[in-house]
């Protein structure tokens, strides 16, 4: 073989090697490019839609709302108040028992004024206790009208004490949806306190599932009054506090008038204006 042919073959071999080397380089670069591209796509790709707990959870209550709810539900006095108000304002028929003294036994006093107001939305019937007969008067008083009926059994009597309903058969309406105790102007403190305890026990006052019982803190009396108005009023409040029962603050309503003595007909009993203040306090309590 001539020298020229050898040179040609050598050049061909070099060319082939160069081509192979070039192909290897190109292949390697292409592979690196694809790897980098795939990595880039993987880093920027949008993940499949997935429902996270944060997206599906309901908004949590604010601390103030939560605390207020806990306070309302944990306060037993508020619970009894709510139940008592519901008896007065609900759409269903209601039976209310008032047990009291001379501040609630006649037609000019707060029970009947309140009944007249309730008659704006319901047919109200008030049965009044007859102390001479030891039973209810045959003819009740009626107020208003409508589909809803409110029946009030007013077991109030002159010089009444919490012992009266325990001694007089039938004065307590056992099927009442709500009982209001209105005592304090009459009776020796030790007798009032003990009989009040017995009466509250009879009513299951404060017991789970029992009908609500509400007490009044009666109006202030003149210093010359021979009774024990202040002491007995304190006893009513103490009994209510012990059983987590609400109290309608009639004393406060009279004092807020600015001249509570002008609201009295004598040393202790309210006059016309006083009865109206009393009725408005009761109405305001039950209407919330």
Image: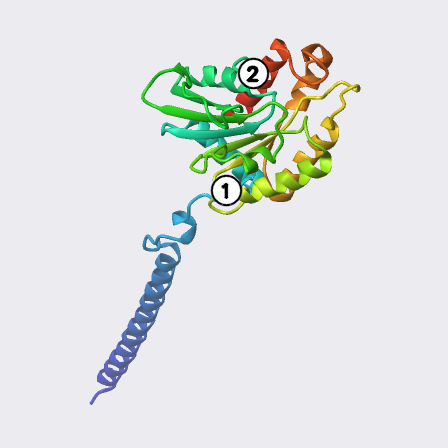
Does 211 appear above or below 258? below
Which of the labelled discs sits on residue 61, or is there none?
Answer: 1
Residue drawn at (71%, 10%) of the image: 262
Is residue 3 something one can see in this rendering? Answer: yes
Looking at the image, residue 160 sits to the left or right of residue 87; the answer is: right
Picture coordinates of residue 240, whole percent (x, y): 63, 38
The coloring applied to the image is rainbow
Q: Is residue 104 left or right of residue 153?
A: right
Residue 109, labelled with which disc? Answer: 2
Between 250 and 224, the one nearer to me in the picture: 224
Name the residue at the bottom extreme. 1
Residue 10 appears at what percent x and percent y? Answer: 27, 82
Is 118 rendered above or below residue 237? above
Residue placed farthest to the right in the image? 223
Secondary structure at badge 1 equals: loop
Direction from residue 237 to residue 40 in the image, left or right: left
The location of residue 36, given as percent across then percent down, is 37, 63
Q: Residue furthest front?
A: 133
Residue 104 quadrant: top right
Figure quadrant of the N terminus: bottom left
Q: Position of residue 28 (x, y in %)?
A: 34, 71
Q: What residue is drawn where x is 76% and y is 18%? A: 222
Sequence-first tag of 1 and 2? 1
- Residue 78: assigned label: none
Please name the residue shown 58% across and 20% down the image. Answer: 281
Disc 2 residue crowd, few under 14, some 14–19, many 20+, Cα 10 Å: many
**Residue 163 figure quarter:** top right
Q: Please indicate whether residue 133 sits to the left or right of residue 274 in the image.
A: left
């Amino acid at each position: 073989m001539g020298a020229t042919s050898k040179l040609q073959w050598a050049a061909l071999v070099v060319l082939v090697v160069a081509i192979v080397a070039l192909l290897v380089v190109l292949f390697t670069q292409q592979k690196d490019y694809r790897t980098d591209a795939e990595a880039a796509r993987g880093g920027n790709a949008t993940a499949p839609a997935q429902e996270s707990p944060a997206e599906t959870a309901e908004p949590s209550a604010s601390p103030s709302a939560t605390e207020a709810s806990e306070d309302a539900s944990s306060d037993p006095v508020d619970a009894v108040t709510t139940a008592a108000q519901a008896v007065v304002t609900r759409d269903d028929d209601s039976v209310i028992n008032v047990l009291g003294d001379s501040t609630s036994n006649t037609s000019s006093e707060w029970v009947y004024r309140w009944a007249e107001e309730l008659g704006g939305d319901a047919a109200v019937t008030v049965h009044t206790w007859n102390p001479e007969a030891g039973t209810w008067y045959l003819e009740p008083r009626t107020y208003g009208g409508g589909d809803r009926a409110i029946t009030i059994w007013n077991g109030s009597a002159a010089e009444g004490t919490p012992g009266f309903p325990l001694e007089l058969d039938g004065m307590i309406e056992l099927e009442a949806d709500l009982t209001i105790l209105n005592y304090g102007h009459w009776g020796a403190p030790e007798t009032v306190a003990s009989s009040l305890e017995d009466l509250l026990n009879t009513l299951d006052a404060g017991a789970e599932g029992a009908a609500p019982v509400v007490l009044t803190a009666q109006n202030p009396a003149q210093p010359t009054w021979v009774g024990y108005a202040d002491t007995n009023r304190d006893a009513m409040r103490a009994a209510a506090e012990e059983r987590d029962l609400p109290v309608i603050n009639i004393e406060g309503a009279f004092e807020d008038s600015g001249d509570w003595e002008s609201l009295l007909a004598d040393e202790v009993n309210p006059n016309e204006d006083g009865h109206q203040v009393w009725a408005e306090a009761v109405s305001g309590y039950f209407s919330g």
